[in-house]
Image (spheres, rainbow, N blue to C red):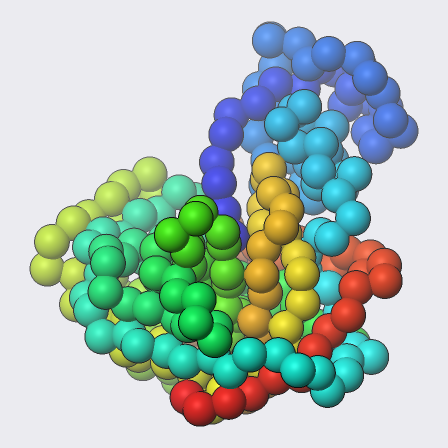
Amino acid sequence: MVGRLLVRLSPAVLATGCGGSSQAPDADDAVEWGYEGPGSPENWAFLSAEYALCGDGRQQSPIDITGYETGDGASITFSYGGDATAVRNDGKFVHVDYGPGNTFSVGRQVFELRSAHLHSPSEHLIDGVSFAAEMHLVHEGVDGDLAVVGLLFRLGGPSAMVQGVLDAAPAAGARVTGGVALDAGGYTPEGPDHYRYDGSKTTPPCDEPVDWYVMRQPKTISAEQVDGLLALSGGPNNRPVQPRGGRRIILGGGPS
C-alpha cells in the first residue's frame, strides 16, 4: 500500500540515522521515503512526524506468516469485473485505479476495490519463505476502513495479469486515463483460502489498522516479468517484515 510525501531530513538527523534523534527536520535537504539510502525503511519513522507509526506502531505490516491457527473467520467473496479508470507511475509503484463496482466481501461487510500495485520481491513471508512478487489489492469500506488482499507470485509461467500492468505502465511521474483495458476480474484469486491478521499500510505513513487477507494459493510470474517490475520501481520495493507481537493469524476460507 502506498502514499507519497516529500519530506525533509537534516544533515544532523542523517548522521544519527535511527538513533532516536528528536531534532526537527531541516528545510534545506529533501529526503523522500523509499527503499534504499537515507530514505530506506529503517529510517521512515525519522523522516517526518507523520511517519511515527512506522517505528512506534504495534501492528505493522508486512509480517512472516507463521504459527497460524484455524479460526472462526467470516467467509470471503470477490465480485470483480470492471476496467481500470487510470494507471499511475510514481517511480516506486505502478498504481492501477478502479471506480465503484468491484467488491470484496467479508461476511456482510463490503469493500470497494480502489487500486492495485505490485511489490517485488514479496513483502509477506510464509513460514520464512519469500516469493518473487506480491500484488496488493487495496479496498475501502463505506466507513473508511481499509482491507488489503495480498496475492503472492512464485517464479513460473508468465502472468497475463502482471503483463497487462507492465504494458499499461506510463513513464515515471505520468498518469493515463481512459481506454485502460485492465479488467479487475483478472485479479480474482484461485480459491478462498487465506491468512487473516490485523496490520497496517506497508508504506509511509504506515497507518493502522488495516485488515489483511493474504491468499494462500500463489500465482506464477516469469523471471522476465520480475525484471520488468524491478525496472519500473528502480529496484526492490518491499518493506522488511515487522515484529508480529501477540497478533493472531487465522486460516480462513469459504465460497469464492
> Residue lying furthest front in this view?
108
**Would you say residue 117 is visible in this rendering?**
no
Residue 242 coordinates in the image, percent (x, y): 77, 56
Residue 63 coordinates in the image, percent (x, y): 73, 64
Seen at 57% across and 30% down, the residue is: 32
- Residue 100 falls left or right of residue 66: left
Seen at 19% across and 48% down, the residue is: 176
Front-most of residues 11 and 250:
250
State the image quarter where residue 47 is shown.
Answer: top right
Front-most of residues 71 and 35:
71
Q: Quadrant of the C terminus?
A: bottom left
> Residue lying furthest right in this view?
19
Seen at 37% across and 78% down, the residue is: 78
Seen at 51% across and 89% down, the residue is: 254
Residue 141 coordinates in the image, percent (x, y): 41, 55
Instruction: Tally the numbered discs.
Output: 0
State the image quarter where residue 190 is shown.
Answer: bottom left
Asked if residue 139 is positioned above or below residue 53 in the image, the reply reads below
Front-most of residues 114 and 239:
114
**Would you say residue 69 is visible in this rendering?**
yes
- Residue 128 falls left or right of residue 4: right
Residue 76 coordinates in the image, percent (x, y): 47, 79
Asked if residue 189 is positioned above or below residue 104 in the image, the reply reads below
